[in-house]
Image: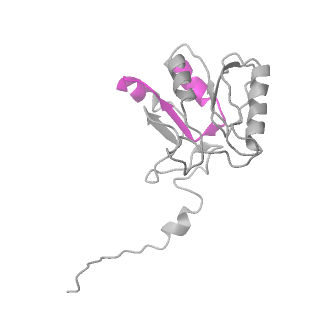
């Protein structure tokens, strides 16, 4: 699985959001961020992470960075921090129960998910995973705007939708329209 993941990740196109062909990911928010992400990557490696695919700045003075993958299984005192960049941290576990325990061992709780062809494994994991969004065989990013959203723990605001939902839900308006005046 990891070999296929690494090969697929190497083929990810990073470019301007309006480039043709359309890229998979664009730049980070600020030109300084790729360097900070590389420092976080180096810090994890110094703590015992195994580099599987190195994230590297792509264009000097921009937010463009290639995606990276680190095996952090043996990192003592793994920082409970989100890296807001295309850095995947892999933690190897013995079984599904250990995977659930590991996934829940964070102060964050925005999204969690499971990749499996066996629905019974998803059904088992779903009530045990502690997150506001729990996906089965789909990406964890880009939550549907139709779904309740807010996350749990230190993610989001612990409420369905977003902080200002009351503003856009407190003034109900309905309209019936017809192109023909009757």
In the picture, residue 44 is in which quadrant?
A: top right
Query: Could you say where residue 29 lies in the image, as x and y percent from the top left?
Result: 68, 49
Camera-side residue: 65 or 45? 65
Residue appearing at x 72%, y 25% in the figure: 78
Q: Is residue 161 left or right of residue 146?
A: right
In the picture, residue 55 is in which quadrant?
A: top right
Camera-side residue: 141 or 168? 141
Q: Is residue 99 left or right of residue 75?
A: left
Residue appearing at x 79%, y 26% in the figure: 43
Residue span colored magenta: 97-124
* Residue 101 is one of the magenta-drawn residues: yes
**Relative vertical location of residue 171 with respect to residue 78 in this rendering, above or below:** below
**Relative vertical location of residue 111 with respect to residue 70 in this rendering, above or below:** below
Residue appearing at x 50%, y 41% in the figure: 133
In the picture, residue 52 is in which quadrant?
A: top right
Placement of the C terminus among the 4 image quadrants: bottom left
Query: Could you say where residue 74 lies in the image, as x and y percent from the top left?
Result: 70, 15
Query: Could you say where residue 157 lies in the image, as x and y percent from the top left?
Result: 61, 51
Residue appearing at x 63%, y 32% in the figure: 67
- In the displayed image of the protein, which residue is found farthest to the bottom? 182
- In the displayed image of the protein, which residue is found farthest to the left? 182
- In the displayed image of the protein, which residue is found farthest to the top? 94
**Relative vertical location of residue 3 with respect to residue 169 in this rendering, above or below:** above
* Residue 33 is one of the magenta-drawn residues: no
């Amino acid at each position: 699985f990891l070999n296929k993941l690494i090969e697929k990740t190497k083929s990810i196109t990073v470019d301007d959001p309006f480039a043709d062909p359309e890229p998979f990911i664009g730049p980070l928010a600020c030109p300084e961020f790729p360097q900070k992400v590389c420092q976080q990557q180096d810090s994890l490696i110094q703590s015992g992470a195994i580099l599987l695919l190195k994230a590297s700045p792509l264009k000097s003075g921009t937010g463009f960075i290639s995606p990276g993958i680190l095996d952090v299984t043996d990192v003592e005192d793994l920082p409970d921090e989100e890296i807001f960049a295309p850095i995947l941290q892999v933690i190897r576990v013995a079984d599904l129960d250990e995977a659930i325990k590991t996934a829940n061992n964070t102060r964050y709780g925005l999204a969690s998910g499971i990749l499996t062809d066996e629905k019974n494994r998803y059904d088992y994991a779903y009530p045990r995973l502690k997150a506001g969004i729990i996906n089965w065989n789909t990406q964890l990013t880009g939550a549907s705007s139709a779904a309740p959203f807010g996350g749990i723990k230190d993610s989001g605001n612990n409420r369905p939708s977003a902080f200002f939902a009351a503003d856009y839900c407190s003034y109900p308006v309905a309209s019936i329209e017809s192109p023909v005046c009757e």
